[in-house]
Amino acid sequence: MPSETLAALRPRTGGRYLDGTLGGAGHSEAILSASSPDGFLCGCDRDDDALEAAGRRLSRFPGRFELRRGNFSEAADWIPAGTLDGVLLDLGVSSHQIDSPDRGFSFQHDGPLDMRMDRRGGPTAADMVNGLPTEELARIFWKWGEERESRRIARALESERRMRPFTTTLSLAGFIESLVPRRGSRIHPATRVFQALRIAVNEELASLQSALPALFALLRPQGRLAVITFHSLEDRIVKDYFRTEAREYDVQGTYDHPDFRIPRAARGLDLHRRGLVATDEETQANPRSRSARLRVLERL
Ligand SMILES: C[S@@+](CC[C@H](N)C(=O)[O-])C[C@H]1O[C@@H](n2cnc3c(N)ncnc32)[C@H](O)[C@@H]1O
């Protein structure tokens, strides 16, 4: 939903923006075009390939952007608070990552079972599948893949890996398919396990949770934080955070009961309480946008 995202961010001449998920820099390019001649863009991505691609694509805007490799949750380390007019997070994996077999994100092609966005370190998906205790694997598949067969899959992986560790995407996908047959579903039985592993390898939900308040603090009054999510786990985190900023009280403790509310001014305006979804036209052109949801929070 590029046009809705751009409309939400309202890029303007002289404005300053952060794209926390550069990817192929399609959104960044649109922001820089719309804020010509002197809008400025800070951009980051955890993935080296994305930085390279973004640098090439944005080279026609010399002096108007600064790109850094890193997690968007650390943007406050290099961007002063209260200085931005807009922040964008377009979460998940890029088409480049999905389409590159050597990255191990997809079981459409065979490749190493890696799934790291940042390949400088940290455990790969293979490390997790071959090394984590069964209960921990089951918890990951259940919590982040919403996989109903999480325990059965984890137990079967545990006994299989003792003889033959899993090293490739197709070996894992094929093994799961042999355990959990499709039963007419169009969705491959390994889809949920792959999603769960990707979230775990990249600590995606923890990054998002800690990033939202940090990124909101980078905005000037009237600045906007726009977040595009691709599954309900991400969307719930964004929705809950936006609601917290938009309400006119703090909660004492963890339970929101009227007796424990401490009045305060709202800090943000939640512009689309249900979020915006892609139009039929867009989902036809780009099937991946079917599960996308855009939420926008304006700083007051
Ligand atoms: C869906 S793509 C972004 C596509 C981009 N908006 C475009 O127009 O091409 C998501 C990108 O965000 C990056 N990413 C995901 N989580 C990140 C994080 N916590 N910090 C930095 N980059 C992240 C991924 O590496 C990927 O390149």
Image: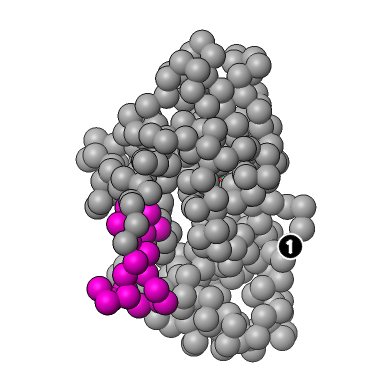
Residue at which label 1 appears: 122
Q: Residue furthest top?
A: 37
In this rendering, is residue 213 above or below 22?
A: below
Does the segment drawn in magenta span residue 242? yes
182 sits left or right of 163 in the view: left
What amino acid is labelled 1 in the image?
Gly
Residue 152 at least partly seen: yes
Question: On the image, which quarter does residue 104 sit in?
Answer: bottom right
Picture coordinates of residue 113, whole percent (x, y): 66, 62
Viewer-closest of 213 and 45:
213
136 sits left or right of 272 in the view: right
Q: Residue furthest front?
A: 263
Picture coordinates of residue 231, whole percent (x, y): 39, 58
Question: What residue is at 59 percent from the left and 83 percent from the top?
Answer: 136
Does the segment drawn in magenta span residue 73? no
Question: What residue is at 42 percent from the left and 46 percent from the top?
Answer: 227
First to last magenta residue range: 241-262
Question: What residue is at 46 percent from the left and 75 percent from the top?
Answer: 143
Q: Is mark 1 within 8 Å of ligand 1?
A: no
Picture coordinates of residue 290, whole percent (x, y): 31, 48
In this rendering, is residue 128 above or below 12?
A: below
Question: What residue is at 54 percent from the left and 70 percent from the top?
Answer: 174
Viewer-closest of 191 and 168:
191
Of the 4 image quadrants, the one containing the N terminus is: top left
View quadrant of ligand 1: top right
Picture coordinates of residue 62, whole percent (x, y): 64, 15
In this rendering, is residue 105 above or below 134?
A: above
